Amino acid sequence: MYSYLRERIKHAVRFRHKRGFGVHSPFMFNLILNVIRDKEKKFNYPEEAEHNRKIRLKQRKLYRLICRLVCFLNVDYVLCFSAHSGDILAYLSGSAARKEANQPRFMREAGFIYIGKDARTVLQDVVIDFLPTATVRQKCIVITDIYKNSFNARLWQQWRGKATVSVDMMWYGLLFFDEKLQKGRYNLII
């Protein structure tokens, strides 16, 4: 456990002192600079979602990141698996994407999939078939609690090997499936 935390802290220190973020992929550099960090506050979030007092700060940050990812990737169809999918869908109300909650039968058609920490209740008995098809070439999957929740950790480990790009952000993970992208595994703490 000590060595794990030491490596994470060492990586964070090295990562933040590089102008190029230590990344050679143009896609990842652009994603980190314009979506994950969002220093310029380019994105506008729906007011009703921002003023919802039930959403905690950590959840709010994740929902904002999901909103930025959906806008950046220009996704047509978003699928959420969570007990709090109403909050996420409220953040995505400004995007033009079609949105569904807890519908596993549409996994192949979705261009963006969010798997929350309580997704086990929805996905436990489902054969998960998510790989990109001819109609959906690019796919992004966000999984929360990739180290705390055993179900989500198992999904993360299975899908990470199949993904073109995986981004481990310690509390959640991003998986990108697109043949046009340069393969890579990234660890980010921002």
Image (tube, rainbow, N blue to C red):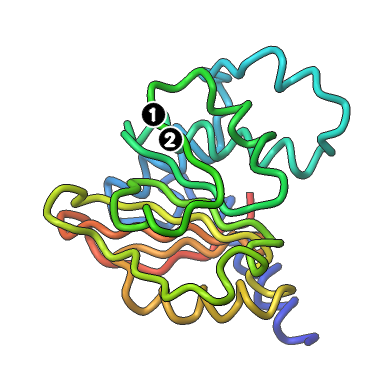
Looking at the image, residue 109 sits to the left or right of residue 114; the answer is left
Q: Nearer the viewer, residue 50 or 164?
A: 50
Label disc, if present, on residue 97 of the rendered structure: 1
Q: Find residue 144 and report its horizontal and vertical position in percent.
A: 63, 60
Q: Residue at x 43, y 35 (%)?
A: 70
Three-letter code for the amino acid on which mark 2 is drawn: Val
Three-letter code for the amino acid on which mark 1 is drawn: Ala
Assign a secondary structure to mark 2: helix
Q: Nearer the viewer, residue 105 or 68?
A: 105
**Which residue is under mark 2?**
70
Report, in whole angstroms, how far the alpha carbon at label 1 lies from the one at label 2: 8 Å
Assign a secondary structure to mark 1: loop
Residue 140 higher or lower than 14, as above or below: above
Q: Quadrant of residue 116?
A: bottom right
Residue 113 higher or lower than 171, as above or below: above
Q: Mark 1–mark 2 contact, CB under 8 Å?
A: yes
Looking at the image, residue 175 sits to the left or right of residue 119; the answer is left
Q: In the rendered structure, which disc, 1 or 2, sits on the residue that comes first in sequence?
A: 2
Q: Mark 1: give few (<14), some (14-19) or many (20+) Cα within 10 Å.
A: some
**Which quarter of the rendering shows the N terminus?**
bottom right
